């Protein structure tokens, strides 16, 4: 769906919009594998869990990106809570960057997000990453990206969802995304999406047998090549 997910509530909201996890009614565990452009050094591995409770929902996620020369490890701890029509959340992200020949540097990052029901069919979501504008290091004026995402989701029925999203890094041009998901038959889902800056097209399939979710997505950049993404989730209760 071209990553147009800021207004969608599912277990992956732990990484996409921490505020949306407050909408979840079930606990889950999940993992993913993402290989960009067929290059092993651009691979991301991720895993996480969301625990639903009467006091709000808690999430813990980890991921690793990169290869031997450059890599990043991330630990993500978050909390989201439903309050009326809105769900709000916050997260603390511990991000370690390792560059061969330059050493390691770890910094804490903060994210805030929310999701609100505008009507039974329309939802609004917003997420702000790196609120405090953390630097790459004490001796540099370079900052980790501060990114704002806002979007709308249209869910007219359980079989269909349409998402629109804008993403803005404060130092880069805005990116616009659109995604569509449709339930083809009882347990199979089809997805597609497109984004700008850079221009990418996305296609995907999902299979949901009982408490499992198994998904595959293909992202296509006309100049650079393809990205393959696999994920699996298990609903605990």
Image (cartoon, rainbow, N blue to C red):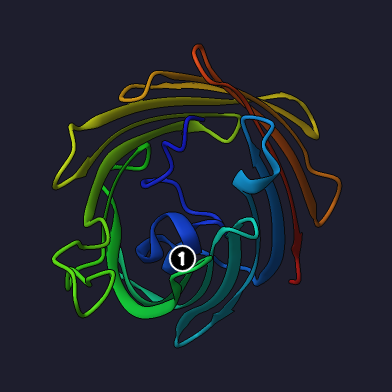
Give the image location of residue 221, x and y in percent. Answer: 51, 19
Answer with left or right where residue 3 lies relative to residue 150: right
Answer with left or right where residue 25 lies relative to residue 172: right
Q: Residue at x 37, y 47 (%)?
A: 6
Give the image location of residue 192, x and y in percent. Answer: 56, 21
Identify residue for label 1: 21
Give the image location of residue 5, x and y in percent. Answer: 43, 43
Q: Name the one closer to the observer, 165 or 235.
A: 165
Residue farthest right in this picture: 209
Q: Is residue 84 visible?
A: no
Question: Height in image: 44 above or below 172?
Answer: below
Q: Quadrant of the C terminus?
A: bottom right
Question: Height in image: 81 above or below 215?
Answer: below
The quarter of the picture where residue 122 lies is top left
Answer with left or right where residue 85 lies relative to residue 46: left
Q: Secondary structure at mark 1?
A: helix
Q: Name the one closer to the observer, 27 or 221.
A: 221
């Amino acid at each position: 769906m071209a990553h147009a997910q800021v207004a969608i509530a599912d277990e992956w909201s732990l990484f996409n919009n921490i505020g949306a996890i407050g909408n979840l009614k079930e606990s889950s565990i999940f993992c993913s594998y993402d290989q960009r452009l067929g290059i092993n050094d651009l691979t991301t591995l991720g895993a996480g869990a969301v625990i639903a409770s009467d006091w709000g929902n808690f999430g813990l996620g980890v991921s690793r990106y990169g290869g031997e020369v450059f890599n990043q490890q991330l630990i993500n701890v978050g909390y989201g809570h439903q309050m009326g029509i809105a769900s709000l959340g916050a997260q603390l992200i511990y991000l370690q960057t390792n560059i061969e020949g330059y050493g390691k540097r770890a910094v804490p990052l903060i994210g805030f997000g929310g999701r609100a029901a505008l009507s039974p069919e329309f939802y609004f979501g917003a997420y702000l990453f790196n609120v405090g504008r953390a630097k790459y290091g004490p001796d540099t004026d370079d900052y980790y990206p501060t990114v704002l995402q806002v979007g709308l989701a249209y869910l007219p029925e359980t079989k269909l969802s349409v998402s629109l999203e804008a993403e803005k890094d404060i130092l880069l041009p805005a990116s616009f995304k659109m995604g569509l998901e449709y339930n083809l038959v009882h347990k199979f889902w089809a997805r597609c999406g497109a984004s700008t800056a850079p221009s990418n097209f996305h296609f995907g399939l999902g299979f949901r047998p009982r408490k499992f979710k198994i998904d595959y997505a293909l992202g296509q950049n006309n100049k650079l090549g393809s990205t393959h993404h696999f994920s699996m989730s298990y609903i605990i209760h």
